[in-house]
Image: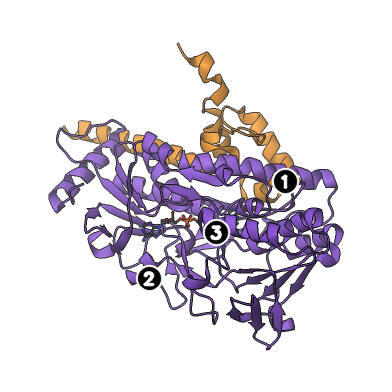
Chain colours: A purple, B orange
Amino acid sequence: MPRSDRRTLLRGLAGAAALGALGLPLRRARAAPPTVVIAGGGFAGASCALALRRLAPQLRVTLVDRQPRFVTGPFCNAVIAGLRPISSITQSHAGLSAAGVRIVHADIDGVEPAARRIRLADGRTIGGDRLVIAPGIDFDWAAIDGYGPAQVERIPHAWPGGAEALRTLRQQLRAMPDNGRVVISVPDNPYRCPPGPYERASLIAHFLKQHKPQASVLILDAKDHFSKEPLFRTAWGTRYGERLQWRGGRRDGARVVAVDSQSRRVRTISGDEYAADVLNIIPPQRAGRLAGDAGLTDAAGWVPVTAHDFSVAGHAGVHVIGDAARAEPMPKSAYAANMQAKLCAHAIARDLAGEPAVETKLINACYSLVAPDYGISITEVYRLDGDTLAAIANAGGISALAADSQTRAAEADYARAWYQNIVRDSFG
Amino acid sequence: MRYRARVIAALLTVFAAAVAAAGEGEMLASACSACHGPEGRSVTGLPSLAGMNRHVFMDRMQAFRHGDGTIMNRIAPAYDAAQTAALADYFAALDRGDNEQRHAP
Ligand SMILES: Cc1cc2nc3c(=O)[nH]c(=O)nc-3n(C[C@H](O)[C@H](O)[C@H](O)COP(=O)(O)OP(=O)(O)OC[C@H]3O[C@@H](n4cnc5c(N)ncnc54)[C@H](O)[C@@H]3O)c2cc1C
């Protein structure tokens, strides 16, 4: 795609403005339509592309991602526990193509906010009137001594890390001794999917209960408290008992600081050592490299955004959505990424059409499976409060602490149904 | 001349307001589609919202606000009467996916 120069940009915007004001495609012959380029085609980037095509069919949308096959974080814990095949959580960009999004499968070398342009590893550039950056997360490899990219094959983080990583972890669980121990290391907030580690521990415990009843799971947590904690603890008590243990940050000094990948031993901040038969390290995280390289991140490694359109202050026409964005109090989830993407798409479409932004509300909802027939959830509704988001006080919260088994089973069904619908809402 | 300009300006204002109103319902509703499907058309056991009678929608939201449901009881209280009505109107105006066949010529 040729980089749009200033004249085509203005003509395109004039065309879009005429359409917005009159509701008719008044685009003059040869006036170039406005263009949006999106770096990253996970939940955030894909949802944004799809929403833009739905809202403003006159826009030309190009999405770049290195992966033709996208293995989702949601339900990857069920794959690890052998409850469903990897194919059931593998998505493609075919639905986006069918919706008229131009897909480029290529490695992105960098994004250039000032030029609103994506630079590919092969030297090509793709520019637009708007640049949306949605690279997800990268890991802070300096955080844990002895755990880096070289150790990932033997000790997968599987966060979610692609099909190979999930297969390896699943295989290691099957192959471990009958009385063995799984150790999971969990980082401090913020990180992708706050309840994810505890769902993972639960579903691994479910697997062990059935196949290796002498084996156990130990969570070594950098935190003292975690998402849906009372619900997880109640469920663990009734379902898994001694089989699933948790040690916390300050209380037990359980933050993992060093890994010996050969012997599969970890050392915590208090100096304690733990041996594992299967070791799963979930490292601390930051925004995907593209955001940091472009100088968009704060000291903690995330991109501060303006809540009403997820734009980046000081960079006209540039938006960052999904896990890479700093959008507290929204968590880093696929639901939030999809929601932010739709807000961003609305804002871009309205802005290009010369319409003012609308007041609105955003939702996040995250289900976790404690077992295939035991689901729990957390939800929050947010309002825009100036440039930031605020959770609405009289709404949101976790599933009822006292609930019958039918309710838990219903929430497990809702979790599976949610997956089907959000995948369609994001990938077409 | 001036009169015509005023009429056009007034028409444009009305139209822009209509676009803005439609946009608000649609934007609010986009928060629902992760669970209830794109444009309110669910492919799963979760209920579709597209084509739902607006009174049924309003009544359900009211019941959720009173504590019914497993998760909607935690979401519905965030929406005031005007927003609930905007959502009801938006979904009521949508074609139910399973009716597409019937509407086809
Ligand atoms: C175990 C686990 C369980 C989870 N469960 C849930 C759940 O139940 N519910 C929920 O809502 N969320 C869940 N999540 C969270 C969810 O996976 C993430 O929040 C979501 O994927 C974020 O979307 P994103 O688009 O920001 O990032 P991603 O989905 O990671 O997408 C980023 C994309 O950018 C591409 N990219 C990055 N850099 C480049 C480059 N240089 N060149 C080319 N392409 C690039 C990547 O290939 C990728 O496709 C879970 C996550 C995990 C790990």
Q: Nearer the viewer, residue A230 or A282?
A: A282
Residue at left offset 55%, top offset 79%: A144
Query: Secondary structure beneath disc 3?
Result: helix
Residue A396 vs residue A62: left or right?
A: right
Give the alpha-carbon distance from disc 2 to disc 3, as whole Å: 25 Å
Ligand 1 near label 2 (Cβ, under 8 Å)? no
* Kind of residue at badge 1: Ala
Image point 43% across, 68% down: which residue? A304
Q: Are marks 1 and 3 in contact (CB under 8 Å)?
A: no
The amino acid pointed to by label 3 is Ala
Neighbour tally class for label 3: few under 14, some 14-19, many 20 plus, Cα within 10 Å: many
Whether discs 2 and 3 lie on one chain: the answer is: yes
Task: Tell how many labels.
Answer: 3
Which quadrant would residue A247 be assigned to in this image? bottom right
Label 1: how many Cα within 10 Å (few below 14, some 14–19, many 20+): many
User: Label 2 marks which chain's residue?
Assistant: A
- Subunit under mark 3: A
Ranked by sequence position, the earlier of labels 1 and 3 is 3
A96 or A271, nearer to the observer = A271
How far separated are the C-alphas under marks 1 and 3? 25 Å
Q: Which mark is residue A165?
A: 3
Mark 2 neighbour class, 10 Å CA radius: few under 14, some 14 to 19, many 20 or more: some
- What is the spatial separation of the Cα atoms under label 1 and label 2, in whole angstroms? 37 Å
Q: Is there a contact, CB below 8 Å, between mark 2 and mark 3?
A: no
Badge 2 amino acid:
Gly
Q: Nearer the viewer, residue A413 or A130?
A: A413
Q: Which mark is residue B13?
A: none
Q: Nearer the viewer, residue B26 or A39?
A: A39
Q: Which mark is residue A292?
A: 2
> For residue A284, what is the image quadrant?
bottom right
Mark 1: secondary structure: helix
Q: Which residue is mark 1?
A: A412
